[in-house]
Image (spheres, rainbow, N blue to C red):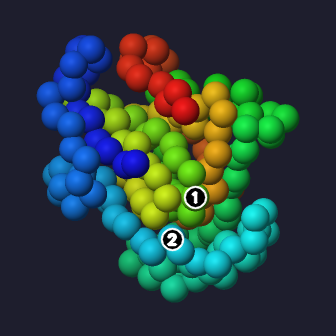
Amino acid sequence: MSNLKIYRDGHPESPEMIVNDKLAMAEELNKVGVRYEQWDANAELADQPTQEQVIEAYKDDIERLMREEGYQTVDVVSMTPDHPQKDAARVKFLDEHRHGEDEVRFFVDGQGLFTLHIGERVYEVLCSKGDLISVPANTPHWFDMGPNPRFTAIRLFNNPDGWVAHFTGDDIALRFNRLEN
């Protein structure tokens, strides 16, 4: 179940706000420039669909975003609890970093925790099936897929090289919640 928790950046023990309604989540995130929306995630897909099958199933929404935002490339990332590199993949995203472009994810299935550090606030966004989040370029953030990850997400990029992170060196991510699924 998706939700949003907003904290002061030095106070990970108690959120200032908890939002469980997706429309209200979109409104709060929009205030800080984060795109959050719901797509219909009920496409008929095989148990382990190919990247091409996933992209084809959501082609209309993908093409709309590409037109609106100028994204150049799209791919699909999937992670399961039995993936041999799940631990290394998890660690790769846990430190605060930024990108020179938007980080766009649509959750076809499963869940993941995006945490954004914007000004003096930390926004924990638990994304689940049907959620699209677009973290604006140069926004400090981190991502946790949990110790037993299970998700499939469509990623859109402006950069043909795909995911390129610039780590901030700040240890703030160590003080906030992890996804423990």
Q: How many neighbours does mark 1 have within 10 angstroms: few (below 14), some (14-19), or many (20 or more)? A: some
Q: Is residue 51 above or below residue 25?
A: below
| Residue 102: quadrant of the picture | bottom left
Towards the viewer: 40 or 90: 40
Determine the secondary structure under disc 1. strand
- Identify the residue shown where x is 78% and y is 63%: 48
- Identify the residue shown where x is 58% and y is 71%: 72
Three-letter amino acid code at the position of disc 2: Ala
Determine the secondary structure under disc 2. loop
Please identify the residue farthest to the bottom as the structure is shown.
60
- Identify the residue shown where x is 72% and y is 27%: 87
Count of numbered labels shown in the rendering: 2
In the rendered view of the protein, which quadrant contains the C terminus?
top right
C-beta proximity under 8 Å, tags 1 and 2: yes
The disc label shown at residue 109, or none:
1
- Residue 105, given in percent of the width and then of the height, sits at 51, 57
From mark 1 to mark 2, how far is it between C-alphas?
Answer: 8 Å
- Identify the residue shown where x is 80% and y is 34%: 85
> Which residue is under mark 2?
41
| Residue 176: quadrant of the picture | top left
Three-letter amino acid code at the position of disc 1: Asp
Q: Is residue 47 above or below residue 151?
A: below
| Residue 124: quadrant of the picture | top left
Towards the viewer: 162 or 65: 65
Towards the viewer: 43 or 117: 43
Q: Is residue 43 above or below residue 137?
A: below
Q: Is residue 128 above or below residue 66?
A: above
